[in-house]
Amino acid sequence: LFSLASAALKSQTRYYFVISLCFGLQAMGQLLLQLACAVNTSSAPSLDFASMHYSMEFVRLLVMLLGVADGAAFNWRAVSALLGERLLLEMDSLARFNEQLVSGLFRQ
């Protein structure tokens, strides 16, 4: 009887964890959308506005985060694949900028 109750408690705990994770992901998506659209004070935040002013990777991330509330599957691998290329491009850009700063410092 104890093992049955323990298994039921673990199952219920896992269920509440998944539900809270989904609400957290959705809340993060809503926050990012609010911040991205904060410059547009004339209308409510929308994915249309975000898609006109931000990268497609960012908009896809918003869609993934906001879609969790509707039962869409959320996959961290998809997020890493989505943002991985952008992250590497930004790191390359920062490395080039750092090299320019160092070479400018040596010229002085």
Image (cartoon, helix red, strand yellow):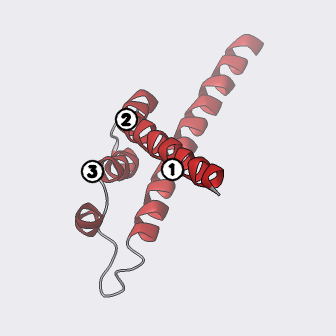
Front position among marks 1 and 3? 1
Contact, mark 1 vs mark 3 (Cβ under 8 Å): no
Does residue 74 show up?
no
Q: CA distance from mark 2 to mark 1?
A: 19 Å
Q: Position of residue 63 (x, y in %)?
A: 32, 50
SS at badge 3: helix
User: Which kind of residue does numbered mark 3 sit on?
Assistant: Met
Q: Residues within 10 Å of mark 1 (few under 14, many from 20)?
A: few
Q: Is 55 positioned to the left or the right of 101 in the image?
A: left
Q: Which residue is mark 1?
A: 97
Q: Secondary structure at mark 2?
A: helix
Residue, far right: 2
Residue 63 in view of the camera: yes
Q: In this image, 15 relative to 53: left or right?
A: right
Q: Are marks 2 and 1 in contact (CB under 8 Å)?
A: no
1 or 3: tag closer to the N-terminus: 3
As displayed, is residue 76 above or below residue 98? above
Q: Position of residue 96 (x, y in %)?
A: 48, 44
What label does residue 56 carry, if any? 3
Count of number-bearing discs = 3
Disc 1 secondary structure class = helix
Expressed as whole percent of the image width and height from the top left, the position of residue 61 reads 37, 47
Q: Where's residue 57, x and y in %?
A: 32, 47
Residue at the disc numbered 2: 85
15 left or right of 84 in image: right
Q: Amino acid at mark 1?
A: Phe
**Comparing labels 2 and 1, the label whose residue is closer to the camera:** 1
